[in-house]
């Protein structure tokens, strides 16, 4: 599998986009959120139950997300990132995979969340940081 940077470099240097598309047909699959979550749980050696407990989300709701039956909000994806104990870079990747904007350091709430992630806080402690700064907590 090619990296995104490799694909971008090929696009920049190609003279014929149709050749690029044909040559990289296998690379054009974007994972669904459910597929991405399955990959992250496998990579982190966690069960869905582990993620539910650490994300502080409703279990039936999370199981629906993991089965692809429910599409969820950006906040819930961030909560799942806490449940998966993802790093800041991994959280950014999960947000992109879910179709949401990355955490942005110039946004006060996002900056506090990035801080919490980098400090390896759990979601309850992260919500305390948000609450203490009079910012909406993750639900």
Image (cartoon, grey):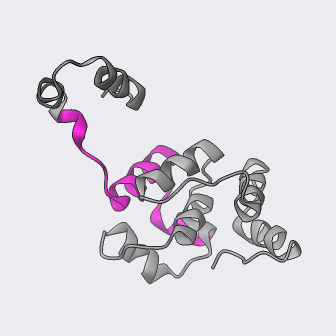
Which quadrant of the figure has residue 78?
Answer: bottom right
Dominant SS in magenta: helix
Instruction: Give the residue at x 19% y 29%.
Output: 24
Residue 4 drawn above or below residue 48 = above
Query: Depth check: 84 or 107 in front?
Result: 107
The quadrant of the picture occupied by the C terminus is bottom right
Instruction: Give the residue at x 77% y 62%.
Output: 108
Farthest-out residue, front: 15
The quadrant of the picture occupied by the N terminus is top left
Q: Horizontal placement of 20 versus 33: left or right?
A: left
Query: Depth check: 93 or 54 in front?
Result: 93
Q: Does the magenta stretch include residue 64?
A: no
Q: What stretch is highlighted in magenta?
A: 26-53
x, y percent for residue 109: 73, 65
Q: Horizontal placement of 63 versus 46: left or right?
A: left
Residue 69 drawn above or below residue 120 = below
x, y percent for residue 20: 18, 25
x, y percent for residue 30: 29, 48
Query: Depth check: 53 or 122 in front?
Result: 122
Q: Horizontal placement of 134 versus 124: left or right?
A: right
x, y percent for residue 116: 76, 57
């Amino acid at each position: 599998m090619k990296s995104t940077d490799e694909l971008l470099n090929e696009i920049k240097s190609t003279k014929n986009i149709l050749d690029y598309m044909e040559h990289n047909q296998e690379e054009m699959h974007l994972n669904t959120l459910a597929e991405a979550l399955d990959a992250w749980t496998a990579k982190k050696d966690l069960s869905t139950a582990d993620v539910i407990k650490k994300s502080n989300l409703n279990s039936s709701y999370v199981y629906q997300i993991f089965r692809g039956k429910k599409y969820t909000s950006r906040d819930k994806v961030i909560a799942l990132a806490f449940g998966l104990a993802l790093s800041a870079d991994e959280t950014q990747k999960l947000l992109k995979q879910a179709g949401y904007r990355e955490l942005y350091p110039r946004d006060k709430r996002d900056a506090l969340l990035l801080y919490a992630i980098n400090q390896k806080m759990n979601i309850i402690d992260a919500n305390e940081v948000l609450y203490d700064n009079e910012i909406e907590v993750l639900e």
